[in-house]
Every structure is written in C-alpha cells, then in structure tokens.
Amino acid sequence: MNNPQNSSAVLVAGATGHLGGEICRQLIEENKQVKGLVRTSSDVNKISQLEQLGVKTVFGDLKDKASLQTALQGVYAVISTVSSTLSRQTGDTIQTVDDEGQINLIDAAVAAGVNYFVFISFSPMPGEFALQTAKRKVEEHLTRSGLNYTILQPTCFMEIWLGPAVGFDYVNGKATIFGEGKNRLSWIAIKDVASFAVAALDNPAARNRIFELGGPAALSQLEVVNIFETKQGKKFELTFVPEDALMTQLAEEGDWLSKTFAALMLGVAHGSEIEMTGTLKVFPIQLTNVNQYAEKVSTYA
C-alpha cells in the first residue's frame, strides 16, 4: 500500500486518447507530477509526445490487475478517461474495459491507498444499452468504494460529434444529421472537460459528487450547421438518418460497437440540454461555445 506522504503523482488512465492527453497537458501546466498509463500496444508517437510534455509513462492495462498495482505506486489521485469505443484493440470490449476494467482500476486504487478518483463517464441517455449500463455500474461501484471521488458526466464532445469521424465533414461542407436535427444539445469541448477534471483535484466542493457537464449554450444539429454555413459562406449538403433506422440498428443482432454507436446517435437525435449554473459556481471555468469551435476548424475548410 502507498504511504500517503510519498504519494505525489496523478495517474491518468487513457493518457494517449484525445481527452487523456489534454488532461495530462493541463496537469503539467499546473505543475503536477503526472503518470500516464499506456499499453505496450499504444502508439509510440503518442507515448513520445506525452514524455516530451513531462509525463512519466507507465505500462499497464485495465484488463491486467497486476500491471495496475505497479502503475499506482506513488499515486495519490487517478483520473480515468478510458473507453473501449475508440481503442478497439484486441480483447477490448465494453465488458472487459468499460465494465470490468474500470472496476479493476478502482479496486486497485483502493488497495494502493490512493486518496482520490476522478471518473469521466457520460450524461444519462434514454433507453438501455451496454455502454450506458457499464458506466452506471462503475459509477455506483466508485461511490461505494470508500475512495473520495468526482464523477463527471459530459454530454457530446464537439470535436467528436461535430467532426468528420461521425459524418460532420466541415471541410467538404457535408453533415450527417441524426433524427430531425431539431432537438438541442449542450455541446462541450474536450479541453473544457479536461479542465473540470483537473480543477476537481484541488477543490473540496467537488468531493464525492456527480456533475453533468455541457457547454454554454444548447443548440440543435441544424442550428450548428447554420453556424458553420455562416462561417464558411456555403451551404452544407445534409444527410438525415431517421430515428427509426437507428432503433432498428440498435435492436438487430450485430457487433457491440455498431449497436453502441446506434444508441449514442439516438442520444444525439433526442437532445441533451445541461443546466450549468450550479456547476460553474463550483468550477469557475470559461466554457468554449460552438461559434468558437466553428471559427477554429473552419480555417481548414
């Protein structure tokens, strides 16, 4: 078990991901000692980038309990951003990573004498699907673990859902719209989610609480398209994916990843407006709006 007096580092699980990397960067800016949990199969360039920032990388895998015990030596706090939805490496599934893996990490943190655990989940969505079930199970496990914790539940990341990976191709002026595109979401920037995670570490008011996170304004998919059209001075070509088609995809037998994204796309179609007034009193963070995001990425269009 750690001696708390000798435990001075923050371990970031998922350090090579977009969110994990940004958390590492912000922690270094705050002069924190940072350990980044990486796998032997992780991109060597991403590992190098972390090390150049000043992150001490340590090898470990949420599916390997023994590796976590070693990685947690000298650690007083853990921030976990890990998810199987983007990693897609051999053996990675919702069951092994988002469910059992996260629970392995929490249990290892308890055993290692870690004081504090920040878990990045996502805001509740309608319906039941495996990823959401796993996230809620892990949240409950964390709250019962005896660790001090903060659970962050961000809604849709701008960089993912307003990016080409899921059909929002701002460079070529094309956008995939889930449902009718009229329900509003409180789109949030990855760097802002990272800021909440980092700020939670030294904020007693964040202890043992769950926060839903969104951006400064709720906008529909069609309103977002209009912002981009105005910025770029051109009309977008829209492709609509009906909710019925997504529900069929979710109900059909198929691979877990396809079903997961069908459920998440339904969540986008249904909308998610997050009231942030109370949360911003705890975390006085200046939130990025969609206009700012569109201004930034439109330079590539």
Image (tube, rainbow, N blue to C red):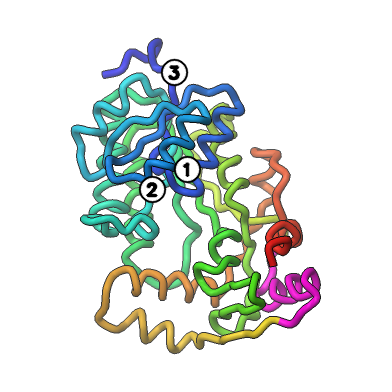
Q: Is residue 97 left or right of residue 7?
A: left
Which residue is under mark 2?
82
Residue 110's place in the image compared with 265, above or below, is above
Element type at marker 3? Answer: loop
Q: Main secondary structure of the magenta part?
A: helix
Between 250 and 67, which is closer to the camera in this rendering?
67
Q: Where in the figure is residue 113, as x and y percent of width and height?
A: 32, 23
Residue 224's place in the image compared with 86, above or below, is below
Q: Nearer the viewer, mark 1 or mark 3?
A: 1
Image mark for residue 263:
none
Between 167 and 48, which is closer to the camera in this rendering?
48
Element type at marker 1? Answer: helix
Q: Is residue 223 magenta?
A: yes
Residue at coordinates 77% horizontally, 79% vertically from top-left? 234
Which residue is under mark 1?
20
The earlier-in-sequence mark between 1 and 3 is: 3
Disc 2 + disc 1, Cβ < 8 Å: yes
The earlier-in-sequence mark between 2 and 1 is: 1
Which residue is under mark 3?
8
Q: Is residue 257 magenta?
A: no
User: What amino acid does circle 1 point to?
Assistant: Gly
How far apart are the alpha carbons under marks 2 and 1?
8 Å
Magenta region: which residues?
218-235
Where residue 263 sits, quadrant-wise, is bottom left
